[in-house]
């Protein structure tokens, strides 16, 4: 519609900046660095999730919970109502 011819794969494209070539070894090294960085981030995320999960498990081990459930006339299946998000303790500090 614009009167221009369709591009073919043989046409050159203008790219901003200087064109640099890389060897396979350089590309492989860059990929390894990216994978190592992602792996470190994942390990930090897993540590944070593990810490939050441990806090929730500790809160569920509360021996007074059965007494509270009986006092409030709740079933053990309703124990989730007594749980608070794990980061509430951090906000109180």
Image: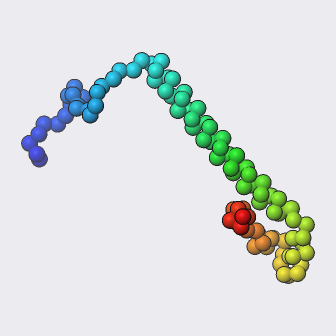
Q: Position of residue 84 (x, y in %)?
A: 73, 68
User: Residue at the spot x=54%, y=29% of the render?
Assistant: 33
Q: Which residue is the extreme one toward the left? A: 3
Q: Position of residue 86 (x, y in %)?
A: 72, 62
- In the image, 67: left or right of 16? right
User: Residue at the spot x=17%, y=36% of the render?
Assistant: 6
Q: Nearer the viewer, residue 3 or 34?
A: 34
**Residue 63 occupies which quadrant of the picture?**
bottom right
Q: Is residue 30 above or below residue 93?
A: above
**Residue 24 occupies which quadrant of the picture?**
top left
Q: Position of residue 51 (x, y in %)?
A: 74, 51
- In the image, 85: left or right of 39? right
Q: Position of residue 72 (x, y in %)?
A: 84, 81
Please count the marks in the image: 0
Viewer can see residue 85: no
User: Residue at the spot x=81%, y=63% of the render?
Assistant: 59
Q: Nearer the viewer, residue 87 or 79?
A: 87
Viewer can see residue 70: yes
């Amino acid at each position: 519609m614009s009167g221009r011819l369709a591009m073919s794969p043989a046409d050159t494209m203008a790219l901003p900046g200087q064109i640099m070539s890389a060897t396979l070894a350089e590309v492989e090294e860059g990929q390894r660095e990216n994978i190592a960085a992602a792996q470190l981030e994942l390990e930090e995320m897993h540590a944070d999730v593990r810490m939050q999960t441990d806090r929730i498990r500790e809160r569920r081990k509360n021996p007074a919970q059965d007494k509270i459930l009986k006092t409030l006339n709740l079933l053990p299946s309703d124990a989730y109502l007594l749980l608070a998000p794990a980061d509430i303790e951090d906000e109180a500090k």
